[in-house]
Amino acid sequence: MTIELKALIPEEISLKNTHLNIAPDTRVQIKSQFSCNLKRNINGDSKLNAITLSFLSLSSEQEPSPFDVRVTYVGFFEGTIADSEEERNFVIEGTKIIYPYLRSAVSALTTSANAPVMLPLACPISFAPGTAQRVNEQKKDGYVFQVDDKLN
């Protein structure tokens, strides 16, 4: 199976200060979540598919964070998907292509906002066979990847 990236569009890039008061030299663990959704047959074209990859790091009462970060990219790919195995491979290959752009946007956003720099892991997901617990959890509306990052 081959896929070709036709377009990559940033859909959302935002950082919101939560005004959390943190004592100096306090380490904060920031939980982040990556989600990936596949939309098939864009505009009725059976070869055009879209993968939406999102990075979210949101503050909550249980896990406070100094800021909320949301970054979403949509990649439009040309390629055919015949069955569920090809769909899974399509999502994995598309994620490998889009993820470096998403990672760079998260880092640039936090840097330019004078917030502590967030640099998501180089590859948050193991794509090797036998590592299903880290590869993805397929949900009805897409694939979800869970990653913990530490803020220094």
Image (tube, helix red, strand yellow):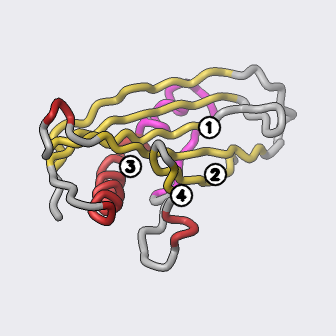
| C-alpha span from label 1 to label 2 | 10 Å
First in residue order: circle 2 vs circle 3: 3
The numbered dot on residue 99 is 3
Residue contact between numbered discs 1 and 4, judged by CB atoms under 8 Å: no
The region drawn magenta spans: 105-122
Secondary-structure class at tag 1:
strand
Which numbered tag is attached to residue 149?
A: 2
Q: Amino acid at mark 3?
A: Tyr
Whole-percent x and y of residue 73?
37, 35
Q: Which residue is mark 1?
A: 57
Q: Is 13 above or below relative to 1?
A: above
Inspect the magenta stretch and tell me whether residue 41 lies in it.
Answer: no
In this view, the residue in front, 48 or 104, is 48
> Dot 4, how many residues are within 10 Å of its Cα: few (below 14), some (14-19), or many (20+)?
some
Q: How many marks?
A: 4
Residue sitting at 40 percent across and 43 percent down?
A: 37
Q: Which mark is residue 137?
A: 4
Q: Are marks 1 and 2 in contact (CB under 8 Å)?
A: yes
Q: Earlier in the sequence, mark 3 or mark 4?
A: 3
- Secondary structure type for disc 4: strand
Q: CA distance from mark 1 to mark 4?
A: 18 Å
Quarter of the image where one finds residue 15: top right
Give above or below for 135 relative to 74: below
